[in-house]
Image: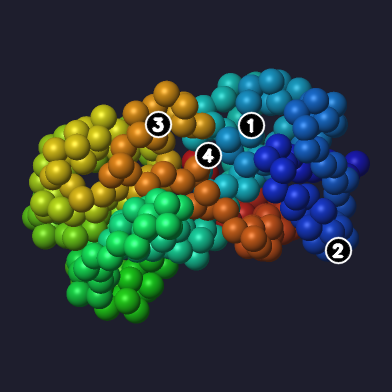
Amino acid sequence: MSKGLLLVDLFSHGDLQVYVDAIRGEKLALQVETADTRPDALTKARDCSILAILDPAIDQTLIDHMPRLEWIHALTSGTNRITSLRYARRPLISNSSGIHGPQMAELTLLHMLSAARDFPKMLVNAAAARWQRWPQMLLAGKRVLILGVGKIAEALAVRCTALEMTVVGMSGSRTEAPGFECIVPREQVGMQAREADFVVVLLPYDPANHLFVNEAFLQQMKQGAILIGVSRGQVVDEQALLRALESGHLRHAGLDVFAVEPLPANSPLWKSPHLTLTPHVGGMSDRYALQALPILLHNLKAFLGGQPGEMLNRVP
């Protein structure tokens, strides 16, 4: 009996057919089902043993409707929700880590340039037909500290270096990487924070990184520095960040991720003139399916071939 794959897209990305065409083109012994609504997913889930889904879209009800589930592939790098669910028998879990470098790096640069040049103020002035000029901060010659050195950080470092910036990093496991002047362990990060013009948060979320960017860390940062948070909201203490911005200790901050998402309408973050907010779009791109497919196809072939040990990005 052939395996059944359920591809779920609950966020209207419109990529389902791209995945289906590519998978069917491989002529695998696989029945492919797709769902773009939750009721549709629940209806089709029962006969499928493989689930491909974005981590934020999964929930316990869907898992409970999949008694044959053997493997979940996250079409995201994060798997926090997937790994937190209850399973009668825990399936194999893999993710799409390693594909998000270009889009995450570009969004980070957008936030850096916007904050450096005070672009939000320019937009307000343009809407009011107000002509106002001020000196423009250059990225060239500035120093950026990247917290967390993985594939995304490497992609960002290459781009920052091309803009004549100095790049340093903090990592618990790496001591060097392309584009980095140096990489320090977390117990030595304070010295780097005091010298950095920009601090970019790319730490994954785990208990060790919970509110890593807290009041004490923010106060170690250079006066007038800029913070960019693009990994996981729970890594940054949002209230402490607001205090650092309101006091003038930090010049600006850009956030793409938040402790609660969607960000509630009554959140004080919306009203801060020193914050630029984007709605967790850092990992998205106009060719996401094409970026994610190579890992998914490789893993499908390994799984169906009875070689789970050959699968990429297995999550413990």
Please tell me which residue is depicted at 46% across the width and 31% down the height of the picture.
263
* Mark pair 2, 3: CA separation: 40 Å
The residue labelled by disc 4 is: 79
- x then y, percent, for residue 23: 81, 57
Choose top left, top right, bottom left or bottom right for residue 209: top left
Q: Is residue 191 above or below residue 72?
A: below
- Residue pictured at 37% horizontal, 73% vertical: 158
Q: Can see residue 238?
A: yes
Q: Is residue 147 left or right of residue 109?
A: left
Residue in front for this viewpoint, 261 or 21:
261
Q: Tag 1, which secondary structure?
A: loop
Mark nearest the camera among 3 and 1 is 3
Work out whether mark 2 precedes mark 3 in sequence or the reverse, and give the earlier one.
2
Badge 2: how crowded within 10 Å, few (<14), some, or many (20+)?
few
Residue 25: mark in rendering: 2
Amino acid type of the residue that numbered disc 2 sits on in the rendered structure:
Gly
> Quick check: 93 above or below 130?
above
Give the spatial CA distance, label 1 vs label 4: 10 Å
Viewer-nearest of discs 1 and 2: 1
Three-letter amino acid code at disc 1? Answer: Ile
Give the crowd class for mark 4: few <14, some 14-19, many >=20 residues within 10 Å: many
Location of residue 190 in the rendering, given as x and y in whole percent from the top left corner: 11, 50
Q: CA distance from mark 2 to mark 4?
A: 28 Å
Q: CA distance from mark 1 to mark 2?
A: 27 Å
- Above-or-below relation of 63 to 32: above
Residue 260 is situated, as x and y percent measured from the top left of the image, at 44, 29
Q: CA distance from mark 3 to mark 1?
A: 18 Å
* Earlier residue among tags 1 and 2: 2
* Residue matched to label 3: 259
The three-letter code of the residue at mark 3 reads: Ala
Q: Which mark is residue 216?
A: none
Q: Which mark is residue 58?
A: 1
